[in-house]
Structure formats: C-alpha cells, structure tokens
Amino acid sequence: MAGIGIFEQCVYGNGNRMGFSRFRDFEKSKSSFSSVAIKYVIEGNEHYAFNKSEYNVAGGKFLLINPQQCHDVFLKAENDVTGICLNIDTAIINDVYRVNHRSLMELLDEPEIIYNDCLEMHEQIYDVRDSDFGTLLGNLGKSFTSKGVELALNSEHLYFSLAEKLLKQQCLIQNTFSRMQAGKTSTKKELFKRIERAKELLESNLFTNINMVEIASTVAMSPFHFNRTFKQVYQVAPYQYVINKRLEKARGFLKENHLSVGEIAHQIGYADLFSFSKSFKKAFKISPTAYKANTR
C-alpha cells in the first residue's frame, strides 16, 4: 500500500462516512457496508468486483454499490490514484424518499415513521457530468484536492443533499425503465446495463468512424434491438446521440478560441466545413463562425 490513507469523517449516524484517498497500490477483499456506497474516482483507475461482474472506474466516474454487497477493490498505478469513498445511511435515503413520495397529511400524522419503501439503487458506473448528484460529487472532489484532507464536511445537510440528488438520479433511471419494452424487471436491468456499456463505447470513440453494428455486437445485441432499446432509454437514436455529443464538444472548442472552425470540424469527425456548419446551426440556431466570434 502506497500513498496516504483514507481520511474518514463520520457524521449524523453510524452509516455516513466520507473519505478522501490517494494510493498507488491498494487491494482489499470482501468489503461490505450497511449503507449505500459511492466510489468516486477523481483521477486514475480503480477496479471493483462483485456479483460476478468487474467494474473499471476511471477518473470522472463513480460506482454505486448497494448495502451489504460484498465487493473486492484493487488498484496499482505509477501515479497517485485519487478518489472519494462515500457512504450514505439508508435511514437518510429512506427518509428523503418518504418525504418526497408521501402526502403532507401522512407526514404530519406519522412524522417519526421511516418506511423501508425506498426504490432499489442501480449498481453501475456513472459519469459525474450526467447528473446533479455527480456535479456535487465533482465539487467535493475539487474541494478535497485543493484544500486537503483536513476539510471536514461534517454537516448533516450535506448528506441530506447527497441523498436527495442521488434519489433524483435513480428516479430518472426508474422512469427510463418504464419506457423499455421488456416484461421482467431483471430483463430491463440487463438491457439497461448493456445500453450503458454501449453509451460508454460511443463516448470513448466519439471522434472516430463509429460502426454501430460492431457496437451492438460488443454488447451482445442485434443492430435493430440495440437501436430500438437505445432510443427507448435515451429518447434519441445512437447515431444522433453521437452527433449531439460531437456538437457539444465543438461548442466547447469554439469557446477556447485556439482552433479555427475548419480545424474543429475536422477534429470532431466531420469531413467538410459545410456539413459541420449545417449541423451546428441546426442544433444551436447559430453558425459556428458567429458563435466563435460572440465568445471573444
């Protein structure tokens, strides 16, 4: 084990913990928690294994693990791997869920009762850029790395905020499940897992000539089944999803003003400036040249 240990601050009950870690070599087997566990990697890669599945969590992403889930963690790197280990007490999560899903009269009549009716969390890797919960995690990561492990975030309000944003994210996933044309919940979970994997592949190969048939094959789906299910989940076809992501990247590049419009078009995978300008204007109601000029 190399690097500093894990700083841990326990607040508002035994199940709430937040730790900042920096390691180059770390391994631990058969870990489990009585609370929901969030493994957020700020920089580097961490590897987890549970439920006969392996998860490689890269920088800017986090893994959600349900309570009592026994898991292994492993990392080995030349440079420091930094991250946050967060545990949120299920009592807080259930309380937040109850307040958001019960009538005011029920809350007034039974203010102390905590129902164990919280929706099930979906164990998978998430990108911090994709939700309010992820944004809050990212901000916590910046605070830890800039101010050091002495930063004690010992406010119960923080854990309520984390629980509320996490539940909001999970409710959106639950709504996605309702759009999927599959009968059993277990089937929907498996389909969602495969589509999430496909999305990761699309985003990691965003500026290459993506072959959707190969993507579908990689996640063990037929091209039509992949296209239909992806559209059910994200409400846009995979090809259009790639175009949207490329244009979002282009908008960021235009703000930086380091490259010409033509260079940006080529960098994000467009064969010519005309096609890029047409797509950009259709998406943002302004030409890339005008957008670049407005950001100066």
Image (cartoon, rainbow, N blue to C red):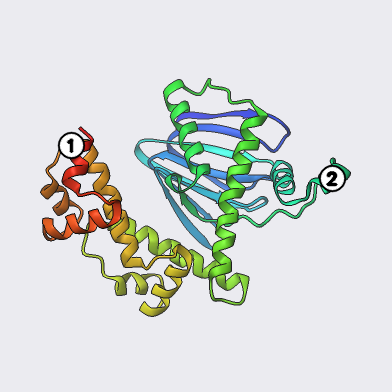
Residue bearing mark 2: 113
Residue 21 shows up from this direction:
no
The CA span between labels 1 and 2 is: 56 Å
Q: Which residue is painted at 43% across and 27% down in the image?
A: 145
Task: Give the camera-side residue of 148 and 47.
Answer: 148
- Tell me residue 62's x, y (percent): 48, 46
Which residue occupies the extreme right position in the image?
109
Q: Residue 226: which disc?
A: none
- Tell me residue 127's x, y (percent): 44, 48
- Quarter where residue 294 is shown: top left
Q: Which residue is painted at 40% across and 65% down in the image?
A: 236
Three-letter residue code for mark 2: Ile
With 215 as the anchor, is 250 left or right in this view? left
Task: Give the camera-side residue of 135 and 88.
Answer: 135
Q: Which residue is painted at 24% across and 38% down in the image?
A: 255
Q: Residue 257: which disc?
A: 1
